[in-house]
Amino acid sequence: MKTQFDIVYRVVLKILVTMAAVGYIIFLIGESTSITDESTFSVAMMYVLFAVFALAYFFLWKNAFISGILLIAWYGLQWILVLWVWDDADMTIVLGMPIFVLGILSLIYGIRQKRLSSSQN
């Protein structure tokens, strides 16, 4: 049975990830680089990262555990890209940290829900 804490936790998590999604979209608009304008690997990877984030956002509404894993993987992929592809994008590691934290919180929520559902059976 879900407690009041679980309900509030999930709502706050959804609000925070939605705010991150809005910020991410504003960032992409600010970059104003279309995937059709420049077909470089770094630009394509920027959109791949966004696709991973969008997939994690979708799963946040369905399965918070998978969403948490995807958000953490998103941050790991961002580290890989900053170290080996994007030469001047060190600040994106700092800007991506809140999404990493949201991934951890989502993963914790998903684990908690799995434990609650298995204890009810």
Image (tube, helix red, strand yellow):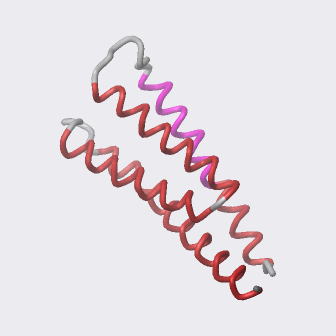
The residue lying furthest to the top in this view is 37
- Up the image or down, 56 lies above or below 104; here it is above
The relative height of residue 52 versus residue 62 in the rendered view (above or below) is above
On-image quarter of the C terminus? bottom right
Question: Horizontally, is 64 left or right of 121 in the view?
Answer: left
From what the image shows, is residue 66 above or below residue 46? Answer: below
Residue 85: where, in percent of width, then height? 21, 36
The residue located at (75%, 69%) in the rendering is 8
Question: What span is in magenta?
Answer: 16-31
- Which residue is at a point 34% across and 26% down the rendered structure image? 43
Assess whether residue 29 is covered by the magenta stretch. Answer: yes
Q: Position of residue 102 (x, y in %)?
A: 53, 60
Could you tell me residue 2's position as x and y percent?
Answer: 79, 78
Magenta span: helix, strand or loop, mainly?
helix
Residue 15 placement: quadrant = bottom right
Q: Quadrant of residue 40?
A: top left
Q: Residue furthest bottom?
A: 119
Please tell me which residue lies in front, 121 or 116.
121
Name the residue at 61% across, 71% down: 109
Is residue 80 shown in magenta? no
Q: Residue at x 67, y 75 (%)?
A: 113
Left/right placement of residue 103 relative to residue 41 reads right
Quadrant where the N terminus is found in the figure: bottom right
